[in-house]
């Protein structure tokens, strides 16, 4: 068995030693070992002369040993058993958790308690960004983004984010509690929606409760300190963002109002676009591209000026030529109006023809 | 380049012509083949590489469809659970989360139950669970015994949602693919239907993918709107949906994140078409729909919908059929609910819902004392 070659002994206690305290009617004896099979992955090995030919799961059961548990007679842990040469190896289905205590029971009497070492290599997570970054926000804002430097645990978001008015009163349920929560693939960015039913005009939630935010008010967004990462460590300090609201924005962003600063030929200076209003931070990262003769120019994107400026830093110096800025119609402003249509559209108004993308030409001479 | 384009078009035309010819010649055989098609064709035994399980639905022959948002894939698993079974007479399990957590060697605050699906053949209940570190698992139960589904190796087939070539690529240039969280999926009429929710733009996508999956196929990718009170329309995300026959015609009954209940005739759902559904009811505020199922109560078809902040709702589909005005008038403040009426049933905080058999529905409920309970309810009570 390959496993035994890689073994790293963490704890070694004998059944006799433990049983002498717990169960005085010991028959036979067992030697329990917790082995670190690979970093952070532990298995259990039981050697005993009293092993029988019964299936190993009939001879050994492993349980979680936690004060958090309120159920009596918790079921044993799922895992795979291998039995050979007077030994049983137990591989848990889900790896044993760092810092957690467990107990193994052999032949219904020999109890062995063990605790998995804490993972000291994992650092506490940090909240590294809240978007929009501006402290001036339209009252019909739809989304906030929270960025973390580590993958965060699921299922905690709606209890860790709260919105308060300036006077300290809580805004009741401003966010739509989506199940599952809207994380990016690596669980480092959470999208929070203000309840769209309350943002949309004339839907019952909007009529009944009004929009979640009102114009010309100051609000405080609080992110609590005990939000955990996937390893169970918390961010450790509370973060607040104070912002003020202005009147609802129901206008489709118009490219005509964008200013372009074309860079000089042979320079590596950024091409910058300036918008009259902040745009959605996440969408700014992937909905604008620069084309030269139909080919995408390589470079990196940054935003400045509270997402009112978009900068493109080319990988290579700019060549002379006729360029195109391609903007995908899905780019939204803070109130989820995209380039094709406002967030909610009055049906009796003539809608513009929908396009998938828009082109802004510019030249470098 | 122009010549190149012409050549490409000619090749495409030839391909289309040959394909059409083949279809014409093979049509009688294909029709025959379609009826006894091998649904597990193309399945391979190995690691499907599941990273998350956001939605589950059973198809025929014990095939379990999984929506994996992290991988942006739909995975069809062969559970081999095809032995006809009888459902448990009654399930009443308190603190199911603590039981599941114990079996997984952790505590209840470390797990989330993502979805629940009942195998209509064996009547076994499948629970999708995520551990805090992101590990996805499926646990099967008859209400008493629990066992994990071995996800590697397993016979499976999968299809990526990212690789869809649709209207998105008119100029042939690769664009950054949108990331969609799979909000619901269903198997209907040999197709896997998937609704997606973007974590960036406020939009909805709906895909219809023929099954068995194959490499070269056309997915219908739809942008779906709904109209409210004849005054505004929004391009909103679908949270849960269900294919359903209304007046003998296939429809999609969808519930949006802002809880309007919207009906689309399936025939209207065509790729690239701006499909506008008709809002037939508004079901409350501060709420997100969680699950929708159809069932029979005393021989009458009924619809049940679970909500994040509202009681379990019963809707009579006949009333949807009879509802002709489709909310063309604005609702008044005095009458906050609009459209087809619904009955609030005395079950709140129902997080998961499915038909167990013809007699009962299985649910997972967050009780007011914090317990997560797993139980059956006879349909005659609903």
Image (cartoon, rainbow, N blue to C red):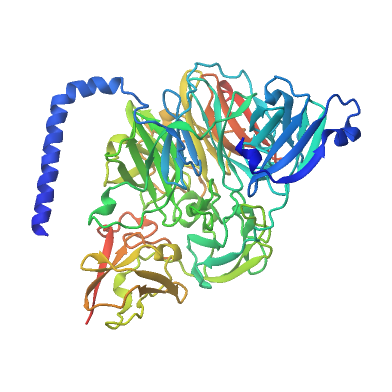
Give coordinates of residue B276: x percent, y percent: 32, 45
Horizontal side, residue B318 vs residue B144: left or right: left
Q: Quadrant of residue A353?
A: bottom left
Horizontal side, residue B325 vs residue A202: left or right: left
Residue ID at (79%, 39%): A113
Q: Nearer the viewer, residue A169 or A82?
A: A82
Give coordinates of residue B299: x percent, y percent: 47, 18
Horizontal side, residue A21 vs residue B246: left or right: right
Q: Quadrant of residue A35?
A: top right
The count of marks equals: 0
Give the position of the C terminus of chain A as an image quadrant: bottom left
Would you say residue A73 is visible in this rendering?
A: no
Q: Quadrant of residue A70?
A: top right
Give coordinates of residue A322: x percent, y percent: 21, 74
Give coordinates of residue A50: x percent, y percent: 78, 24
Would you say residue A138 is visible in this rendering?
A: yes
Whether residue A311 is situated above or below residue B6 in the rendered picture = below
Give the position of the N terminus of chain A as an image quadrant: top right
Residue ID at (64%, 56%): A160
Q: Nearer the viewer, residue A210 or A365?
A: A365
Horizontal side, residue A121 vs residue B331: left or right: right
């Amino acid at each position: 068995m390959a496993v035994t070659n890689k073994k790293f002994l963490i704890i070694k206690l004998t059944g006799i030693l433990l049983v002498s305290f717990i169960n005085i009617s010991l028959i036979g004896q067992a030697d329990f070992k917790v082995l670190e099979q690979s970093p952070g992955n532990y298995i259990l090995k039981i050697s005993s002369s009293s092993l029988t030919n019964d299936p190993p799961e009939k001879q050994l059961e492993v349980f979680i040993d936690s004060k958090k548990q309120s159920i009596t007679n918790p079921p044993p842990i799922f895992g795979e058993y291998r039995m050979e040469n007077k030994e049983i190896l137990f591989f848990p289905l889900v790896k044993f958790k760092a810092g957690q205590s467990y107990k193994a029971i052999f032949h219904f009497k020999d109890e062995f308690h063990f605790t998995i070492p804490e993972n000291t290599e994992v650092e506490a997570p940090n909240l590294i960004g809240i978007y929009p970054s501006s402290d001036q926000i339209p009252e019909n804002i739809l989304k906030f983004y929270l960025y973390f430097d580590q993958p965060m645990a699921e299922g905690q978001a709606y209890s860790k984010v709260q919105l308060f008015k300036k006077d300290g009163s809580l805004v009741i349920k401003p966010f739509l509690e989506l199940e599952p929560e809207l994380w990016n693939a690596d669980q480092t960015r959470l999208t929070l929606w203000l309840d769209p039913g309350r943002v949309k005009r004339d839907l019952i939630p909007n009529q009944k409760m009004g929009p979640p935010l009102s114009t010309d008010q100051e609000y405080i967004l609080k992110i609590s300190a005990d939000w955990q990462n996937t390893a169970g460590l918390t961010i450790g300090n509370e973060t607040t963002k104070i912002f003020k609201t202005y009147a609802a924005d129901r206008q489709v962003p118009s490219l005509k109002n964008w200013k372009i600063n074309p860079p000089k030929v042979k320079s590596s200076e950024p091409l910058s676009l300036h918008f009259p209003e902040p745009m959605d931070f996440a969408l700014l990262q992937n909905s604008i591209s620069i084309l030269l003769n139909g080919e995408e120019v390589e470079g990196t994107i940054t935003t400045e000026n509270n997402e009112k400026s978009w900068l493109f830093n080319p990988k290579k110096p700019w060549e002379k030529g006729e360029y195109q800025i391609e903007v995908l119609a899905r780019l939204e402003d803070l109130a989820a109006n995209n380039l094709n249509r406002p967030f909610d559209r009055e049906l009796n108004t003539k809608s513009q023809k929908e396009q998938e993308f828009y082109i802004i030409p510019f030249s470098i001479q | 380049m122009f010549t190149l384009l012409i050549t490409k078009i000619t090749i495409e035309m030839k391909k289309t012509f040959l394909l059409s010819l083949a279809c014409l010649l093979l049509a009688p055989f294909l029709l025959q083949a379609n009826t006894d098609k091998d649904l597990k064709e193309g399945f391979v035994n190995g690691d499907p590489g599941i990273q998350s399980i956001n939605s589950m639905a059973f198809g025929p022959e014990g095939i379990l469809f999984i929506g994996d948002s992290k991988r942006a894939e739909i995975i069809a698993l062969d559970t081999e659970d095809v032995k006809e079974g009888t459902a448990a007479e009654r399930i009443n399990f308190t603190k199911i989360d603590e039981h599941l957590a114990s079996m997984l060697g952790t505590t209840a605050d470390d797990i989330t139950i993502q979805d629940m699906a009942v195998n209509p053949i064996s009547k076994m209940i499948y629970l999708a669970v995520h551990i805090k570190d992101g590990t996805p698992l499926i646990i099967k139960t008859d209400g008493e015994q629990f066992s994990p589904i071995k996800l590697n190796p397993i016979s499976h087939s999968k299809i990526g949602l990212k690789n869809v070539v649709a209207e998105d690529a008119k100029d042939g240039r690769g664009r950054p693919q949108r990331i969609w969280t799979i909000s619901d999926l269903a198997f209907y009429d040999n197709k896997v239907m998937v609704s997606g929710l973007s974590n960036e733009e406020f939009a909805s996508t709906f895909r219809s993918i023929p099954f068995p999956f194959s490499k070269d196929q056309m997915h219908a990718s739809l942008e779906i709107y709904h109209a409210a009170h004849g005054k505004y329309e929004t391009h909103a995300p679908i949270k849960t949906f269900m294919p359903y026959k209304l007046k003998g015609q296939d429809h999609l009954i969808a519930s949006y994140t802002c809880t309007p209940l919207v009906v689309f005739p399936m025939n209207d759902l065509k790729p690239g078409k701006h499909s506008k559904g008709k809002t037939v009811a508004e079901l409350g505020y501060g709420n997100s729909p969680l699950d929708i199922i159809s069932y029979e109560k005393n021989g009458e078809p009924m619809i049940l919908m679970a909500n994040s902040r509202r009681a379990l709702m019963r809707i009579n589909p006949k009333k949807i059929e009879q509802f002709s005005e489709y909310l063309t008038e604005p609702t008044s403040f005095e009458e906050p609910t609009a459209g087809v009426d619904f009955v609030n049933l005395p079950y709140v905080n129902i997080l998961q819902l499915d038909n167990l058999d013809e007699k009962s529905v299985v649910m997972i409920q967050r009780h007011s004392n914090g317990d997560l309970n797993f139980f059956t309810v006879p349909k005659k009570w609903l």
